[in-house]
Amino acid sequence: MTSEEVQSLSPLYDTKKECIYCHKTFTTKKVRSKFIRISKRDSDFCNHYEGVNPYYYEVFVCTHCNFAFTEKFQPLKVANKAVIKERYIDNASITNLNGERGFAEAVKSFKLAILCATLAGESHYLLAGLCLKLAWLYRFEGNKVEENRFLKSALENYIKTYELENGTGYNKASLLYIIGEIEYRLGGYERAQKWFSILLSDKTLDPKIVNIAKDRWQEIRYERQQK
Ligand SMILES: [Zn+2]
């Protein structure tokens, strides 16, 4: 076997990234697609994986300046770079999060990305997505308290997206669905009902998501009757 063939047996591979803050290049790990196996998907679109978890490697953490970001971050604006420097880079202790990651490293990388996204003035939609994935990491570990804490942060950011952002960069039907779904998960049945009814009564929305939402709402009502 050649060393290349041996390498390809490993689920992880090294890839080079350019930091969007300092523009230096660093090495980080990604999961080979043939090793990604979904065993189930939750009603809030959380995938459960067999073996290596690709969510663990979604955040890139620069080894030169510690800035943490994902593929979805926008290029940084000059004004935000100054804020990031003062409130993050100048005090950052370099963490090495770019080897194989366990749960603790994955959580740390998402927490850094949430902080960096906030300082970078990123959209509420992007922040919500980071909080939601962090909640999922805790779900995989069975830590309900931390899961709910970050579901709540995700919900707040999704609601702000709905109320404040102008509708670009996301699917409105998916947004309404995820808001309703998280409300329900956090025990807010009436609030969930409000969001699902906005979604189900809007004829202009993506019919594929509307159908998923119809099924999900029936399921929620059924679960509720069983209690
Ligand atoms: Zn950097």
Image (tube, rainbow, N blue to C red):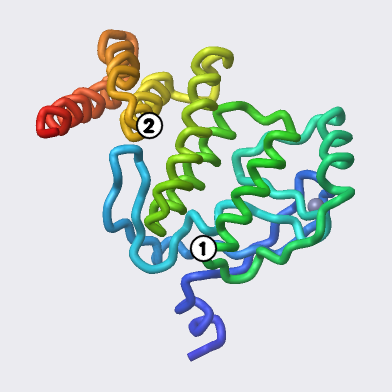
Task: Out of 222 and 119, give the one closest to the viewer.
Answer: 222
- Quarter of the view holding residue 185: top left
Q: Which quarter of the image is occupied by the C terminus? A: top left
Residue 45 position, x and y percent, is 35, 41
Q: Is residue 211 above or below residue 163?
A: below
Q: Quick check: marks 1 and 2 in contact, CB under 8 Å?
A: no
Q: Name the side, left or right, on which 195 lies relative to 32.
A: left
Disc 1 marks which residue? Answer: 103
**SS of the residue under disc 1:** helix
- Mark 1 close to ligand 1, CB under 8 Å: no
**SS of the residue under disc 2:** helix
Disc 2 marks which residue? Answer: 182
Q: Residue sitting at 37 percent across and 27 percent down?
A: 183
Q: Residue sitting at 66 percent across and 65 percent down?
A: 98
Amino acid at pointer 2: Ile
Amino acid at pointer 1: Phe
Earlier-in-chain disc, 1 versus 2: 1
